[in-house]
Amino acid sequence: MTLIIRDSLDADLPAITAIYGHAVQTGTASFEYDPPDPAEMARRRADVLDKGFPYLVAEQDSTVIGYTYVNTYRARPAYRFSVEDSIYITPDRQGAGIGRQLLPALLQRCEALGLRLVVAVIGDSGTMASIRLHERCGFAHAGALPNVGWKHGRWLASVFMVRALGPGAAAPPRAVA
């Protein structure tokens, strides 16, 4: 079965909404309690695309089985070369290597945009699959916030990981309007 990594389309929103909804309801990758409805997911995707950032899906057998995107890390102008990544895989395909194809494609697109740093905020220090995926894709540990969130009856830590793009901090960024 061939895996296709491509830009997301409006038609992908039902699958994206279902994948994220499952993660919200059953997991700790997101600190949301209630899954957003399709209109809210469409609004969030439009926000990413309006900023010129990539929003990619993994498709197999005409079915979206995962997605990834970046968005602003922080709103203040000095942060404009840094973004935060998100990646979600449908539950029945987790551990099948989908993320190892999706995340590098996302990083490549970010580097082409002149971005310099991708921040991963992993929503639970026990989410070893996400931590390992980011490590395999060149991310380094940058710290953690212990017991910062409460979900599913327990305290959760957020793990921070970072990956430089292009020359990283070794050179100034190219001019941006």
Image (spheres, helix red, strand yellow):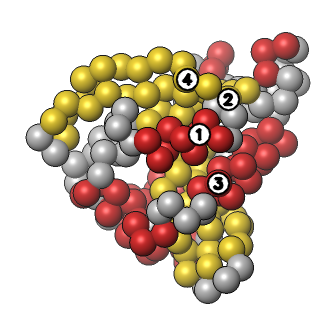
Residue drawn 72% across and 49% down?
104
Tally of marks: 4
Dot 3 crowding, Cα within 10 Å, few <14, some 14–19, many 20+: some
Q: Nearer the viewer, mark 3 or mark 2?
A: 3
Give the spatial CA distance, label 2 vs label 4: 9 Å
* Rendered image: mark on residue 134: 1
Dot 2 crowding, Cα within 10 Å, few <14, some 14–19, many 20+: many
Secondary element at image label 3: helix
Give the spatial CA distance, label 4 vs label 1: 9 Å
| Residue 60 in the image: above or below residue 101 | below
Name the residue beneath numbered marker 4: 141
Q: Is residue 34 left or right of residue 51?
A: left
* Image marks 1 and 3: residues in contact by CB distance under 8 Å: no
| Residue 36 in the image: above or below residue 48 | below
Q: Position of residue 168 (x, y in %)?
A: 79, 22
Q: Is residue 124 left or right of residue 102?
A: left
Name the residue beneath numbered marker 3: 100
Q: Amino acid at mark 3?
A: Arg
Q: Amino acid at mark 1?
A: His
* Image marks 2 and 4: residues in contact by CB distance under 8 Å: no
* Image marks 2 and 1: residues in contact by CB distance under 8 Å: yes
Q: Nearer the viewer, mark 2 or mark 4?
A: 4
Q: Amino acid at mark 4?
A: His
Q: Is residue 80 left or right of residue 156?
A: right
Q: Earlier in the sequence, mark 2 or mark 4?
A: 4
Q: Position of residue 124 (x, y in %)?
A: 35, 36
